[in-house]
Image (cartoon, rainbow, N blue to C red):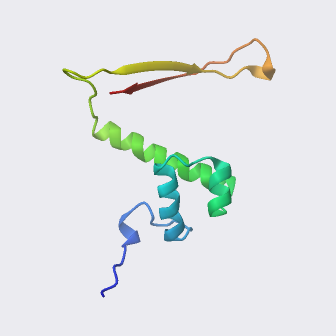
Amino acid sequence: MQEIRFDEDCSFFEGAHIPLTELVEFLYFWADNLQTTAFLHKNLGWGEHTITDWKNFLRDLCVEEFLVNPQPIGGPGHIVEIDESKFVHRKYSGARMLSGQWVFGGID
């Protein structure tokens, strides 16, 4: 049986200081929505900053992919649900709200 080799130089694994097997396991957990920091720390032994960095990196990859290849939702015979939320930060748990970020989501 011939050994299959993965070329790490042509992917986002290049330069990663984490074993490929752990990265693949992380990708599986991330894709299966098992991505709480506590869960990932327990199962992979990674630190909080490493987990946050990789989750942000994967989010950025997805954003880039959807910006380059937008996928319209809806069409004849489809029901589309759209919702919005505004996330704000209150300074010192007081009434004064700082500027916030609007987030929109839709599902077909």
Residue lying at the far left of the rendered structure: 76
**Which quadrant of the rendered structure holds the N terminus?**
bottom left
**Which quadrant of the rendered structure holds the C terminus?**
top left
Residue 94 as seen in the image, left or right of residue 45: right
Residue lying at the far top of the rendered structure: 95
Nearest to the observer: residue 90 or residue 108: 108
Nearest to the observer: residue 61 or residue 81: 81
Q: Name the quadrant containing residue 66.
A: top left
Residue 87 as seen in the image, left or right of residue 27: right
Q: Residue at x 57, y 48 (%)?
A: 35
Percent x, y of residue 62 = 40, 44
Nearest to the observer: residue 31 or residue 68: 31
Q: Residue at x 36, y 78 (%)?
A: 5
Q: Is residue 43 above or below residue 93?
A: below
Q: Tell me how many marks there are.
A: 0
Q: Residue at x 45, y 66 (%)?
A: 14
Percent x, y of residue 39 = 64, 52
